[in-house]
Image: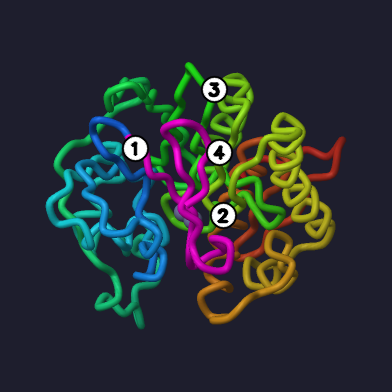
Amino acid sequence: MLKISNKFYLIEGPNHGQYPYSNFLFIDDQIQTLIDTGWGRESLKSLDNKTIDLIINSHFHLDHRGNNKAFPNAHVWIHRLDAAAVKSRESFVDYYVGNFSKEGVDLSNISESPVHREFENNELICLGEVELQVIHTPGHTPGHCAFFWKEEKILYAGDIDLSRSGPFYGTMASNIEDFIASIKKLKELDPEVFISAHEGVIKEDIQGGLDRYLSNIYDREFRILDSLRKPRTLEELVLLKPIAGVFREPKDLYYKLEMFGIVHHLQRLIKAGQVFRDGSYYMQIQPGTSRIGEV
Ligand SMILES: [Zn+2]
Ligand SMILES: [Zn+2]
């Protein structure tokens, strides 16, 4: 465990918390708390069988709450909008792929966890000395939250992770506009210690990191728009990999995640009047031309 402040400890997941692992927090206060629980038993070793009273999950993804089940006596709290996907496997799959493509989805690896309380934006969670403010930061998932201890300006930002490959919005329930607003919200908090679930503790150039993270979204959108100088189908766009750049294994999964991300961008571009759809083809609307009725 890495001591961050007098109450906060970082628990680093295997491989420095890179996906499918993650980094999470132990708060040593009157109410002994974990913010997220990571994935895989190895992640829990440094906790030395500590009693955990409360688990606060940043969102429903398994790399952040797969170990909830290791603490059967702890209460589990999560934002209202992500609770269903923690409580039920079927909702979990819905949040990922919706009705789009459920064939081949293996439900057996998706653990369920009880939820004892569903919180809302701006709630204060008092753990003793530490008072955590819930910062609802949707986009990655509908109920994704960050947690801020104002007194020490420490922020746990979950999967607003400032990774070079992020932000990630490649699921049905993700939303790019929300993600942009959430990044801006964290900038306004102006934290001095930024804890990323996949990059660890960041103390230098947090504002610059958030700016670069935000510009990744606009860069991807530019690449998509630029590739639509000629008509392309969604499948052709996916193979250009404008978001991920490269597909990791399993390639089938990353193909789908890329597709969802591109669909979210296309919806934005169509709404902004920059792209139109003609059957299964998408194309850029050239400045100065007018298109009627394609949206
Ligand atoms: Zn996530
Ligand atoms: Zn994650």
Looking at numbered disc 4 in the image, what kind of residue is underneath it? Phe
**Residue at 42% from the left image edge and 50% from the top image edge:** 173
User: Disc 4 vs disc 1: Cβ atoms closer than 8 Å?
Assistant: no
Q: Which of 167 and 6 is in front in this view?
A: 6
Which residue is pictured at 17% across the width and 37% down the height? 117
Residue 149 in the image: state x and y as whole percent.
45, 24
Q: Confirm or deny contact between disc 1 and disc 3 (CB under 8 A).
A: no
Q: Nearer the viewer, mark 3 or mark 4?
A: 3
Res 117 label: none
Q: Does the residue labelled 2 lie within 8 Å of ligand 2?
A: yes
Q: Dot 2 corresponds to which residue?
A: 198
Separation of disc 3 and disc 2 at Cα? 20 Å
Does 56 sit above or below residue 44? Answer: above
> Which label number is shown at residue 153?
3
- Give the residues drawn in magenta, as a range: 1-28
Task: Please report contact status of discs 3 and 2: CB closer than 8 Å, yes or no.
Answer: no
Q: What residue type is labelled 3?
A: Lys
User: Which residue lies under the disc numbered 1?
Assistant: 28
